[in-house]
């Protein structure tokens, strides 16, 4: 009798804590999540979700294996149920303080397990806490190279190694871009050419060597990490720059207020970006750990924009 | 006073030199071209400097040849490796290279001449506020204090891999892909990118 009563109590408790699922654009929570912060965060997608669009997510500086990383990962997984992004770009610092098999598990495989199970691909770049051997890891999809290119729809992605931007890499980049007829060209790497961060700031020596190439061959947007916050930089010579480096670590208050570079910045909480590229438009939405949309907007392809202006 | 013949010879010589120089440029990335054009001394190495650079590059290639021959004897690592395979390969690779280089000493690759050349190159590249910024990066901001300056020892996984300034990389002797320059404090290391061993180091590279 006691056992039956105990069982009834358990069933009642489970029923009371059950999932409450609402329609698209509203709150969605689960009682089974270990943390309260992201599990109760509302899911609100402001992207158009057009047919045939290229949909991805951008995170950076994730590899702590800490609670914060897991919270963001949990929210990413929940967002995928509503906004089915196909792949993730990782901005580097994928594994902090260790490269053992244990580190890969704790700082990557476990937090993103559900996404990996759903066959979401992660395309990584190397940060200043990442050894070159990460390029060989199956789930980082780097083809064994420290810098590489891949294409999705009408978008070409260039992952670069900003730890070691030598003549060989620059030559490769220029050769690839010169023959690339893709409508969108996106570069991503760890160190930001433009940044309003107090700890690091703009990587001017890097900018000096890559910006001329980006300008010459029509790179549309650049994503970077390294700074542990989010920043959208005002277009620099027509190119859009984003920093998404708060996927696992936060440097609160690090953005220099009043920086002439900043279009929008958020350094109060961790965050990630959702991106949708549909024909001539790149839509973006930046989500904080508690589910708040801290930035959003749309970029029109610069080439199309200038063609329209001249007509 | 130069006579007319010598004057025209000088003009012809300069024209030929410029024409030769311009034929080389189109094959290089624009950023590299811009950098070389702005740093005449990189292009115009003295015969002595050319010897020093060539000898340094030869010693680096010698190390690479050794480590390639040792790595070829290990089970091959694919580009879709698991973390366990990556870790096992790195450990085994470290062991064989360390055993083969038990006699390696500081200065075997960064000889005094090579180190002097590199110091001058860095000094020329970083002046004024650039030098202050570099010092701040390597001495204050970098998480590299626990890196031991010991030849044939591993660069610790826990320590940061400081970004090498790209404009400096264009000026230094070029390295094969298997080895990397890396700043630790004011010192410069040569590190194997796969087994993470410190191949050699030089002190006080940063002015």
Image (cartoon, rainbow, N blue to C red):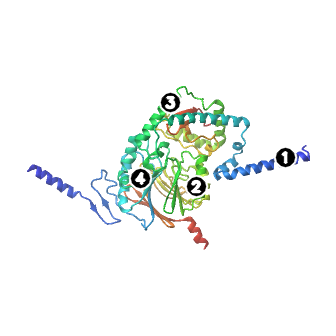
Q: Which residue is disc 4 drawn over?
A: A270
Quick one: A8 or B53, which is closer to the camera? B53
Q: Is residue A49 above or below residue A224?
A: below
Quick one: A249 or A305, which is closer to the camera? A305
Q: Is residue B57 above or below residue A272?
A: above
Q: Which residue is disc 3 drawn over?
A: B98
Q: Which residue is disc 2 drawn over?
A: A176
Q: In the image, what residue occupies the spot 45% across and 34% down?
A: B92
Quarter assignment of residue A288: bottom left
Respond whether the residues carrying marks 4 and 3 are from the same subunit.
Answer: no
Q: Is residue A187 above or below residue B69?
A: below
Disc nearest the viewer among 4 and 3: 3
Disc nearest the viewer among 3 and 1: 3
Report the Cα–Cα distance between label 2 and label 1: 41 Å
Decide: few, some or many residues near mark 3? Use Cα within 10 Å; few <14, some 14-19, many ≥20.
Answer: many
Respond whether the residues carrying marks 4 and 2 are from the same subunit.
Answer: yes
Quick one: SS at disc 1? helix
Quick one: SS at disc 3? helix
């Amino acid at each position: 009798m006691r056992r039956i009563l105990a069982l009834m109590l358990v069933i009642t408790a489970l029923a009371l804590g059950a999932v409450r699922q609402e329609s698209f654009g509203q709150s969605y929570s689960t009682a089974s999540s270990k943390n309260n912060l992201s599990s109760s965060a509302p899911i609100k997608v402001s992207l158009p979700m057009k047919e045939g669009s290229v949909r991805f997510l951008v995170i950076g500086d994730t590899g702590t294996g800490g609670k914060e990383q897991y919270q963001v990962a949990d929210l990413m997984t929940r967002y995928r149920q509503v906004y089915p992004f196909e792949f993730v770009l990782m901005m580097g610092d994928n594994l902090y303080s260790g490269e053992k098999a244990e580190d890969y598990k704790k700082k990557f495989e476990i937090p993103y397990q559900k996404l990996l199970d759903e066959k979401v691909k992660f395309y990584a770049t190397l940060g200043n806490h990442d050894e070159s051997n990460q390029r060989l890891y199956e789930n980082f999809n780097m083809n064994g190279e420290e810098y590489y290119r891949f294409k999705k729809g009408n978008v070409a992605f260039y992952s670069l190694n900003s730890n070691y931007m030598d003549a060989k890499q620059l030559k490769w980049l220029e050769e690839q871009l010169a023959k690339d007829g893709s409508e969108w060209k996106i570069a991503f790497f760890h160190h930001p050419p433009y940044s309003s961060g107090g700890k690091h700031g703009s990587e001017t020596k890097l900018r000096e060597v890559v910006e001329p190439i980006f300008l010459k061959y029509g790179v549309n947007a650049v994503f970077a990490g390294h700074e542990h916050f989010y920043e959208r930089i005002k277009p620099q010579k027509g190119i859009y720059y984003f920093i998404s480096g708060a996927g696992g670590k936060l440097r609160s208050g690090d953005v220099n207020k009043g920086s002439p570079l900043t279009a929008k910045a958020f350094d109060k909480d961790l965050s990630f970006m959702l991106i949708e590229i549909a024909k001539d438009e790149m839509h973006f939405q930046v989500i904080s750990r508690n589910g708040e949309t801290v930035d959003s907007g749309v970029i029109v392809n610069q080439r199309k924009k200038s063609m329209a202006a001249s007509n | 006073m130069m006579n007319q013949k010598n004057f025209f010879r000088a003009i012809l010589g300069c024209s030929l030199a410029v024409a030769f120089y311009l034929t080389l440029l189109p094959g290089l990335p624009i950023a590299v071209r811009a950098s070389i054009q702005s740093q005449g001394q990189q292009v115009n190495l003295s015969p002595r400097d050319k010897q020093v650079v060539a000898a340094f590059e030869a010693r680096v290639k010698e190390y690479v040849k050794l480590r390639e021959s040792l790595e070829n004897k290990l089970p091959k690592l694919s580009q879709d490796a698991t973390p366990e395979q990556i870790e096992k390969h790195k450990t085994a690779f470290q062991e064989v290279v360390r055993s083969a280089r038990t006699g390696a000493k500081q200065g075997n690759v960064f000889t005094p001449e090579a180190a002097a050349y590199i110091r001058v190159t860095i000094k020329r590249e970083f002046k004024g506020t650039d030098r202050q910024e570099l010092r701040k990066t390597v001495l204050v901001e970098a998480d590299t204090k626990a890196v031991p300056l010991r030849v044939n020892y591993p660069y610790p996984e826990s320590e940061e891999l400081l970004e090498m300034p790209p404009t400096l990389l264009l000026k230094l002797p070029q390295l094969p892909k298997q080895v990397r320059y890396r700043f630790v404090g004011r010192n410069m290391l040569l590190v194997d990118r796969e087994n993470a061993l410190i191949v050699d180091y030089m002190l006080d590279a940063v002015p």
